[in-house]
Image: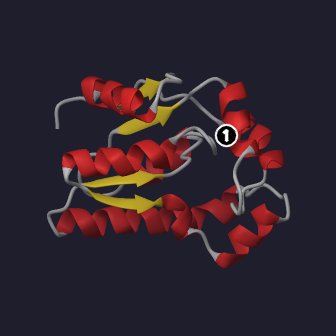
Amino acid sequence: MGVSGSGKTTIAVDLAKELGYVFAEGDEFHSDANRAKMSSGVPLDDDDRAPWLAAIRDWMTQQAREGQSTVLTCSALRHRYRDVLRAAEGRTIFVHMAPPADVTTGRIGSRKGHYMPPSLLQSQIDTLEELGPDEEGIAIRSTGTPEEVLTEVLDRLPSM
């Protein structure tokens, strides 16, 4: 979880490979209308996010029923959004990718062809709620290489 440009996908792909889990990119669950809205520079609201989060939750449940563990990228910025994801069958552990804002801004600025424009980053930062005591997870604030960050994630993940 985390704002756009925080390194979610880079780390999640490697984490899924390392653990032998199924990977999914949360952005792929967005509707065309959501993508168009973000591309035009308009932040999503809770009504836009509800079916997206439900689709992710349902995918997680389907995978759990098939005996598959998953690694999924999703901004999951608010506690109530994470509540939807935690309603999936199986255990949900959040890895909050949280590098300094200037690092994230730099990453977004160098992206090409992504529908999430840099202008929406501040709205995500403003929306973000840190993990609460009722949420199982860790925050990763590292700005190291992807390999260093992955090692930190693996070292700090609760026993699975």
**What residue do we see at 67% from left, 40% from top?**
107
**Disc 1 marks which residue?**
107
Q: Residues within 10 Å of mark 1 (few under 14, many from 20)?
A: some
**What residue do we see at 14% from left, 63% from top?**
67
43 vs 77, left or right, is right
**What residue do we see at 72% from left, 63% from top?**
115
The kind of secondary structure element at disc 1 is helix
**Amino acid type, callout 1:** Arg
Viewer-closest of 83 and 127:
127
Asked if residue 109 shows in the view, the reply is yes
Q: Compared with residue 95, is residue 86 higher up or lower down, i.e. above or below?
A: below
**What residue do we see at 62% from left, 42% from top?**
5
Q: Compared with residue 51, is residue 2 higher up or lower down, i.e. above or below?
A: above
Measuring from the top left, give residue 9's x and y in whole percent.
48, 49
Q: Quadrant of residue 38?
A: bottom right
Measuring from the top left, give residue 152's x and y in whole percent.
34, 24
99 vs 17, left or right, is right
Q: Specify the quadrant that holds the C terminus.
A: top left
Measuring from the top left, give residue 33's x and y in whole percent.
72, 75
Viewer-closest of 29 and 82:
29
Viewer-closest of 118 and 91:
118
